Image (cartoon, grey):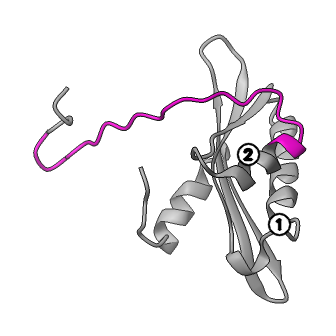
Amino acid sequence: MEIDEPFTQDCLTEFLADDRNVYLTVHIDGQLAGTLHAIGYIHPAGQRYLYVDEVDTDEAFRRQGVATAMMRTAREIARDMAASAVWLGADDGNDAAHALYRSLGAQEIEPGAICTYEIDPAHGNDGGA
């Protein structure tokens, strides 16, 4: 599910109010070069994980170490949270992202689908399920 709407100050403030959430930015020469946001959670069995929901690098700054720096920082934050792993996904065909994650030592890259169930709060519709 893509979210194409811009962040608002209120939404970002709400996201950052939860100390399990992570939002990183990289600026180069005063310009926003990249962002990463992630969510920390605890599995019912007790393991802690950091799920990286999105890594974005502005096209003008790609292949300059921006995403690498953000992923390394995310791993440090996960370590500080006592997480046992960092998880993230990359779209099929995004060879650059797959190569980056492998270069950073990803132990496992597995194929799969992410399923979305849209919720329509106005109609109580759960997407037909």
Report x, y in % for residue 87: 70, 35
| Mark 2 nearby-residue class (10 Å; few <14, some 14–19, many ≥20) | some
Which mark identifies residue 66?
Answer: 1
What predominant SS class does the magenta segment belong to? loop
| Nearer to us in this view, 21 or 85 | 85
Magenta stretch in the rendered image: 102-124
Q: Answer whether residue 106 is magenta in the image.
A: yes
- CA separation in Å, label 1 and label 2: 15 Å
Q: Answer whether residue 16 is magenta in the image.
A: no
Q: Which residue is mark 2?
A: 98
The mark that comes first in sequence, 1 or 2, is: 1
Report x, y in % for residue 70: 81, 58
Amino acid at the residue labelled 1? Val
Residue for point 63% across, 32% down: 41
Quarter-of-image position of residue 45: top right
Residue for point 15% across, 38% down: 125
Quarter-of-image position of residue 92: top right
Amino acid at the residue labelled 2? His
Report x, y in % for residue 7: 49, 70
Left or right: residue 129 compared with residue 116: left
Q: Note whether 117 is above or below 38 in the view shown.
A: above
Report x, y in % for residue 36: 69, 58
| Mark 1 nearby-residue class (10 Å; few <14, some 14–19, many ≥20) | many
**Element class at badge 2:** helix
Q: Note whether 58 is above or below 119 in the view shown.
A: below
Left or right: residue 119 compared with residue 30: left
